Image (cartoon, grey):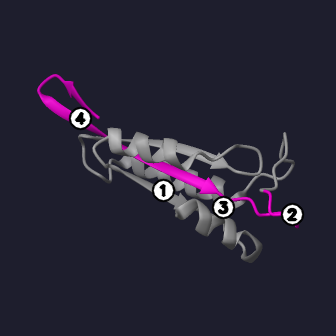
Amino acid sequence: MTVNAGSVARHVFRLYLIKPSHYDDDGYVTQWLRSDIPSNTMATLNGIALECSAARVLGEAVDIVITTLDEANHRIKPNKIIREIEANGGRGLVALVGVQTNQFPRAVDIAR
């Protein structure tokens, strides 16, 4: 998305930080209504992304929009994320964060 603010064209870069869940013994994604333990990795990377946004590391005319999704208590919709990045001219990044060994199969499925 491009926004004209005065004479400077501004752009949006969409950053998705996704913490995958894992599959249970029956092959379903494990999810809860509420998660008791927040992801330290997610919080740390979100903080770094906020600092990058404030420092304008992608340029003065680029606004970074950060979306954090923890699959333990949020449904991940890869097709929706793809459409949002495509609608934004392809300016975006999806990062799978804090992936442990038991979460790797789910992370690969999300990435596909």
Q: SS class of the residue under badge 4?
A: strand
> Which amino acid lies under the numbered mark 1 shown in the image of this protein?
Val
Residues in magenta, as a range? 1-28
Residue for badge 3: 41
Marks 1/4: CA distance?
21 Å
Residue at coordinates 57% horizontally, 57% vertically from top-left?
Answer: 45
Please name which of the two marks, 1 or 2, marks the residue nearer to the observer.
2
Marks 1/2: CA distance?
27 Å
Residue for badge 4: 10
Q: Earlier in the sequence, mark 2 or mark 4?
A: 4
Residue at coordinates 72% horizontally, 69% vertically from top-left?
Answer: 103
Q: SS class of the residue under badge 3?
A: helix
Tell me if 70 is positioned left or right of 5 in this view. right
Instruction: Answer few, some or many: residues within 10 Å of disc 1's Cα (few below 14, many 20 plus, some between 14 and 19).
Output: some
Residue 27: % across, % down: 80, 63
User: Is residue 2 in the magenta section?
Assistant: yes
> Which amino acid lies under the numbered mark 2 shown in the image of this protein?
Asp
Instruction: Answer few, some or many: residues within 10 Å of disc 3's Cα (few below 14, many 20 plus, some between 14 and 19).
Output: some
Tell me if 52 is positioned left or right of 109 in this view. left
Residue 54 seen from this side: no
> Which amino acid lies under the numbered mark 4 shown in the image of this protein?
Arg
Residue for badge 2: 26
Residue 95: % across, % down: 52, 60
Instruction: Answer few, some or many: residues within 10 Å of disc 2's Cα (few below 14, many 20 plus, some between 14 and 19).
Output: few
Marks 2/3: CA distance?
27 Å
Tell me if 45 is positioned left or right of 90 in this view. right
Marks 1/3: CA distance?
15 Å
Q: Earlier in the sequence, mark 1 or mark 3?
A: 3
Please name which of the two marks, 1 or 3, marks the residue nearer to the observer.
1
Residue for badge 1: 94
Q: Earlier in the sequence, mark 3 or mark 4?
A: 4
Between residue 98 and residue 88, name the one nearer to us: 88
